Image (cartoon, helix red, strand yellow):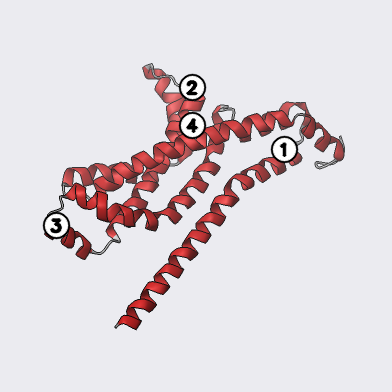
């Protein structure tokens, strides 16, 4: 069929474009569900890590350290290959959502913890002096400010999460990477066009998020600059 990027290879790829679209749909669904799971776990364990209870801080630390310091691939393979020996079998799609979500939840937990601890202690003290409980202070004072701070790093985590869904290809998860590799190895050996198109599709998913993160960071910097200028002028 000529060279690795010959027109005949591209023609075959575009003739089978629905396979790539199906894989893209699976990747998107896994990414959305895994991101939701990561956010839920991240908020819970992020709050645990800032709790006054040592036991909750210890649980959060164990979770974060374990999942941050073991490869996602190992976690995927363990769930896929080891758990069936004890009678636990899950669909590849569910494995992807759980493993990717739990893995990134550890990183989101650190983002949430850093956001909460970045709020000046004076605001905690002011809330307590006004009779706010810990939960009320979190709900009405700390978390609203934390959301603005953590949005850029959370956006970066979302980008990494989308790219990490490609590990499902290792367990035949039906995602974009798996569909591309299967199509290319199925007699055509058209890996060049398959990987170029796959890379372009991942880029189209991630690039808008990256641009939004950068724009949001600039807005935060501009706001802080205006606030500092106003404070100096008032002084």
Cα distance between the residues tagged 1 and 4: 22 Å
Q: Quadrant of residue 225?
A: bottom left
Q: Residues within 10 Å of mark 1 (few under 14, many from 20)?
A: many
Q: Nearer the observer, disc 3 or disc 4?
A: 3
Judging from the image, what secondary structure is the residue with disc 4 in?
helix
Q: Which residue is mark 1?
A: 194
Cα distance between the residues tagged 2 and 3: 48 Å
Please indicate, yes or no, whether residue 54 appears anywhere in the rendered image: yes
Please tell me the numbered disc located at residue 96.
Answer: 4
Q: Quadrant of the N terminus?
A: top right
Q: Earlier in the sequence, mark 1 or mark 4?
A: 4
Measured along the vertical axis of the image, is residue 6 above or below residue 146? above
Left or right: 209, with 53 as reference point: right
Please tell me the numbered disc located at residue 91.
Answer: 2
Judging from the image, what secondary structure is the residue with disc 1 in?
helix
Q: Residues within 10 Å of mark 2 (few under 14, many from 20)?
A: few
């Amino acid at each position: 069929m000529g060279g690795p990027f010959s027109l005949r290879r591209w023609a075959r790829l575009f003739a089978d474009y629905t396979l790539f679209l199906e894989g893209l749909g699976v990747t998107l669904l896994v990414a959305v569900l895994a991101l939701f799971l990561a956010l839920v776990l991240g908020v819970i364990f992020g709050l645990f890590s800032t709790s006054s209870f040592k036991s909750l801080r210890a649980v959060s630390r164990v979770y974060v350290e374990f999942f941050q310091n073991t490869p996602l691939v190992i976690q995927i393979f363990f769930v896929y290959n080891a758990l069936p020996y004890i009678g636990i079998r899950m669909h590849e799609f569910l494995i992807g959502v759980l493993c990717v979500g739990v893995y990134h939840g550890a990183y989101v937990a650190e983002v949430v913890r850093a956001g909460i601890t970045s709020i000046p202690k004076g605001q905690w003290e002011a809330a307590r002096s006004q009779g706010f409980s810990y939960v009320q202070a979190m709900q009405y004072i700390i978390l609203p400010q934390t959301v603005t701070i953590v949005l850029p790093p959370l956006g970066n985590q979302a980008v990494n999460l989308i790219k990490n869904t490609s590990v499902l290809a290792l367990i035949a998860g039906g995602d974009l990477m798996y569909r591309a590799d299967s199509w290319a190895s199925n007699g055509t050996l058209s890996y060049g066009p398959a990987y170029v198109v796959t890379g372009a599709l991942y880029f189209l998913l991630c690039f808008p998020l990256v641009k939004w993160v950068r724009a949001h960071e600039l807005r935060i910097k501009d706001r802080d600059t205006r606030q500092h200028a106003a404070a100096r002028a008032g002084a």
